[in-house]
Amino acid sequence: MRLRVPSMTYPDVRHTVELQGSQVRCTCPGFYFKHKCWHVGVIRELLEYRRMMRLQASALGGVVCS
Ligand SMILES: [Zn+2]
């Protein structure tokens, strides 16, 4: 799973956050130097949101695709 997020500092720049299994990595300098950045939080929140949607849907007897 990949996510493109805009840079806070440079509006023209976009970073790519990539999720592989439980490993998250990002192409921004912050992640490169400190191994953490807010982009990683974005993808984690998105995943959590999708998980909640699935749970709610299955509770109602439905299925969420993708
Ligand atoms: Zn980042």
Image (tube, grey):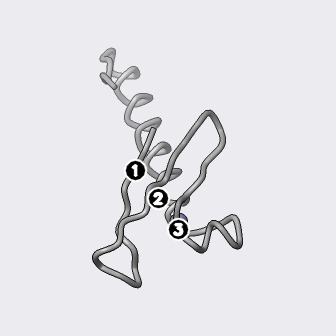
Badge 2 element: helix
- Residue lying farthest right? 34
Label 1: few (<14), some or many (≥20) within 10 Å?
some
Q: Residue at x 47, y 35 (%)?
A: 51
In-image side of 45 versus 37 (left or right): left
User: Mark 2 or 1 closer to N-term?
Assistant: 1
Q: Position of residue 42 (x, y in %)?
A: 47, 59
Q: Is residue 51 positioned above or below 66 on the image? A: below
The disc label shown at residue 36, or none: none
Image quadrant occupied by the N terminus: top left
Badge 3 element: loop
Q: Cβ–Cβ below 8 Å for labels 2 and 1?
A: yes
Q: CA distance from mark 2 to mark 1?
A: 9 Å
Badge 1 element: strand
Residue denoted by label 2: 42
User: Mark 2 or 3 closer to N-term?
Assistant: 3
Residue type at numbered disc 2: Val
Residue type at numbered disc 1: Leu
The disc label shown at residue 3, or none: 1
- In which image quadrant can residue 32 be found? bottom right
Q: Position of residue 60 (x, y in %)?
A: 33, 21
Q: Is mark 2 within 8 Å of ligand 1?
A: no
Q: Position of residue 7 (x, y in %)?
A: 39, 74
Residue denoted by label 3: 28
Q: CA distance from mark 2 to mark 3?
A: 14 Å
Q: Position of residue 27 (x, y in %)?
A: 52, 61
Label 2: few (<14), some or many (≥20) within 10 Å?
some
Q: Residue at x 53, y 51 (%)?
A: 44
